Each structure stands twice: as C-alpha cells, then as structure tokens.
Image: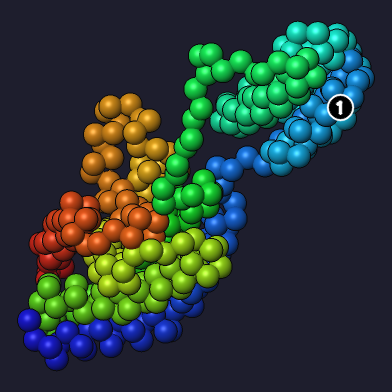
C-alpha cells in the first residue's frame, strides 16, 4: 500500500464531499437534528398521566387521597366524574388514561377499621403506559395506606401491627435517580453514528459509477485496499467529529453522568466507526446506484440499531430466537459499551467481549469490501 496513492484518494474524496451539499448536510445537520429529536422525543419516564376522579365520598380523607395522586407528579388531574357512564365516556374519548373511584363509605370504613377499598380503571390500549401508570398508582396507594394506618393506630391508642411485615430498603447503583434519559441517550449516540456513517460512505463508489469516473479510477495503479482506506479516511474524520459532538452533547446538554475513561470511549468509538463506515462502503461497491446503496445501508444500520441493539427494547425480555439474532447485531455491542462507560465507568478490560466483537466485525467487513471491489468493467 503506497502512502502517496492513499493520500491522493483521500484528497479526491475530501473535495467530493466539499462540493456535494447533500453529503455536507448529512454529515453536519443530521447529527444535530437526530440528537434533539431522539434525545427529547424518546423517554421511558411517564409523567403527567391524565387522571380523572370519581369521588363519591366527598370527605377530607378522599380529598387527601386525590392530593397525594397529584403531589406524586406522575398524574395530572383532568376533571371530576359523577357517574359510571361518565367514566366510560372519559376513557373512550381519551380524556383520561385512568379513573380513580372512591366509594361513598370510604371515609367511614377507613375510620372504623383502618382498611378501605377503592377502584382504579385504566385504558389498556397503550399497554406500556398502562403498566407503568398502574405501578405508579399502586405506589401512591401503598404510601397513602401506610400513612392512614399509622394515623388510625395513633387515634385509637394502638401501635401499628408489625407481624409479618417486611421493610424493603432498595439501593440503586449507576443510575441512582432511575432516570430513563441516562439509559436512552447513550444509545442515541450509537443510532446517529450508525445512520450517518453508513449513509455517507454508501455514496462513495456508487457515485463514481453514476458520474462516469470509474473508468479513470480503474486505469490508475491504485489497489482495492488503497481505494477503500483512502475513501474512508475523510469520512472517518467527519464521523469522529460527529461522535465528539454527540458525546459532548450527551454529557453537557442532557446531563448524562460520565464516569469512564475518555481513552476507552475514543478507542471503542473508533472501532464502531470502522464497522459502520465499512458497511456503507461495502454496499457502495456492490450496488452501483447511489439511491440503492443508501437504501440498503439504511436498512442494515437503522433497523438493527433501533430494534435489536437494546437501545429501546430490553434484550433480556425478547424471545429466545430473537435474543440469538441480536448476537449478530454489531450495534448491540457498542450500545453496551456506551452505557457501561458512561454509567459504570467500565474500562477496556471490562469491555473485552463487546470490543472483540466490534473488532471482528471491522476486520470481516473490511476484508469483504476489499474482495468485492474489482478493477474491471462488466
């Protein structure tokens, strides 16, 4: 591999990028747009669930219960309902995601026995939101029950029962606030780099065919390896700039804690960039249309990264055959690395397995790309 020829190809590709507004837009604007859209648009935290109340008791105790729902921050009261038909209409018309019904004898039964019942109804067409909202409601009710029980015992001169009770003292590591943003934003970085990197390099060789310059390129003494490395150097530099922008935004804009080593992050990000750039270049070699190459590159990067990498859906909760498929998804390993470096402070030694998987992908895709390029016209 001759350095002179390598630099000549890199310089040629840099000029092509500079003269192509579309490539510049993809390289510079798409990371910013994706970071803002995915960073703010994707969240597993459910806040302000619209909640309606059917208070048949109209007592101080029932009002206190409603106030506890509001004070939790998880629910946003919408309106008071006065009949079963109003409950059904509120849920059917999606004015409320849930309805709390407090029976007419709630305060009397609670005062007399220390135990009372109430009903919650939730719209389960959105199962994810419903499951989380039910958990929130159970938490509010459990806290309220404990407070009412202590108050009832104090009013009756009795000590609260401790027989058969278990006190749980949970400790949460790495994401102490249970903020889903700390879990999701590092995965957003992987999505952006996969999309931008593959889209840019999918145009490289296909552009030569469409513009009729491939004949001149083939006639030069440049080898397939020199062509691949020379064309990828400018995109690697652009991709790394995008990576720095995304990672800095993750820490300083979205306030995701960073506990790891910058060297570990740089090395693993560089390896991931080689993988995604190689995929785009391979598609550009195999498919001589820029549109076709970019579409296939999008299919091979966007869908696996968003659906099967653990970015949005927990791999552990997937069926066994799908979990086996995720082992072939290169983005899975980078998402694991990002979360471990950011939240756990993992070192390169701790990440030996996912890093080795990325290195294998980089070598295999590079080898396939070199073998795919042929210096002849057919």
Residue at the spot 87% in from the left edge and 19% down from the top edge: 55
Identify the residue at horizontal 67%, vertical 24% (top origin).
146
Closest to the observer, 91 or 114: 114
Residue 162 lies in quadrant: top right
Observer able to see residue 325: yes
Q: Quadrant of the C terminus?
A: bottom left
Foreground residue among 242 and 79: 79
Q: Around disc 1, counting alpha carbons within 10 Å, would you say few (fewer than 14), some (14 to 19), or many (20 or more)?
A: some
Residue occupying the point 32% across, 72% down: 262
Residue 242 placed where, x, y %?
A: 42, 72
Instruction: Describe the element under mark 1 as helix, strand or loop.
Output: helix
- Report if residue 302 is visible in the image: no
Residue 72 appears in which quarter of the rendering?
A: top right
- Give the x, y percent position of residue 116: 74, 11
Does 277 sit left or right of 182 as displayed? left
**What residue is pinned by disc 1?**
63
274 and 108: which is toward the camera: 108
**The quadrant where residue 237 appears:** bottom left
Would residue 232 be found to the left or right of residue 91 on screen? left
* Vertical comparison of 18 with 377: above or below: below
Relative to 160, 167 lies left or right? left
Image quarter of the N terminus: bottom left
Seen in the image, is 216 located left or right of residue 17?
A: left
Question: Between 130 and 117, which is closer to the camera in this rendering?
Answer: 117
> Which residue of the protein is positioned furthest toward the bottom in this rendering?
4
């Amino acid at each position: 591999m001759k350095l002179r020829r390598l630099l000549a190809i890199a310089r040629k590709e840099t000029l092509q990028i500079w003269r192509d507004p579309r490539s510049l837009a993809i390289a510079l604007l798409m990371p910013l747009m994706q970071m803002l859209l995915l960073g703010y648009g994707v969240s597993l935290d459910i806040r302000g669930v619209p909640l309606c109340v059917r208070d048949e008791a109209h007592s101080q105790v029932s009002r206190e219960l409603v106030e506890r729902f509001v004070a939790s921050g998880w629910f946003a009261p919408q309106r008071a309902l006065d009949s079963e038909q109003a409950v059904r209409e509120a849920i059917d018309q999606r004015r409320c995601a849930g309805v709390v019904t407090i029976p007419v004898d709630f305060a009397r039964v609670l005062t007399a026995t220390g135990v009372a019942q109430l009903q919650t109804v939730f719209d389960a067409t959105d199962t994810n939101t419903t499951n989380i909202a039910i958990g929130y409601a159970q938490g509010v009710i459990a806290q309220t029950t404990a407070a009412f029980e202590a108050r009832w015992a104090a009013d009756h001169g009795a000590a609260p029962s401790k027989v058969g009770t278990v006190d749980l003292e949970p400790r949460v590591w790495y994401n102490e606030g249970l903020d889903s943003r700390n879990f999701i934003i590092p995965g957003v970085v992987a999505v952006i780099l996969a999309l931008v990197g593959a889209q840019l390099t999918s145009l490289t060789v296909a552009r030569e065919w469409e513009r009729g310059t491939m004949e001149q390129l083939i006639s030069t003494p440049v080898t397939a390896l020199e062509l691949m490395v020379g064309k990828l150097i400018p995109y690697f530099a652009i991709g790394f700039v995008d990576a720095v922008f995304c990672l800095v935004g993750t820490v300083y804009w979205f306030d995701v804690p960073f506990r790891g080593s910058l060297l570990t992050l740089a090395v693993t990000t560089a390896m991931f960039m080689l993988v995604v750039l190689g995929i785009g270049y391979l598609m550009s070699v195999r498919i001589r249309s820029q549109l076709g190459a970019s579409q296939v590159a999008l299919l091979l990067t966007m869908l696996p990264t968003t659906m099967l990498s653990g970015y949005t859906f927990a791999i552990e909760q997937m069926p066994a055959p799908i979990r086996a498929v995720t082992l072939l998804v290169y983005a899975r390993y980078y998402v694991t690395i990002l979360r471990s470096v950011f939240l756990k402070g993992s070192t390169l030694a701790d990440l030996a397995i996912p890093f080795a998987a990325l290195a294998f992908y980089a070598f295999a895709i590079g080898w396939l790309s070199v073998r795919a390029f042929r210096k002849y016209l057919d």
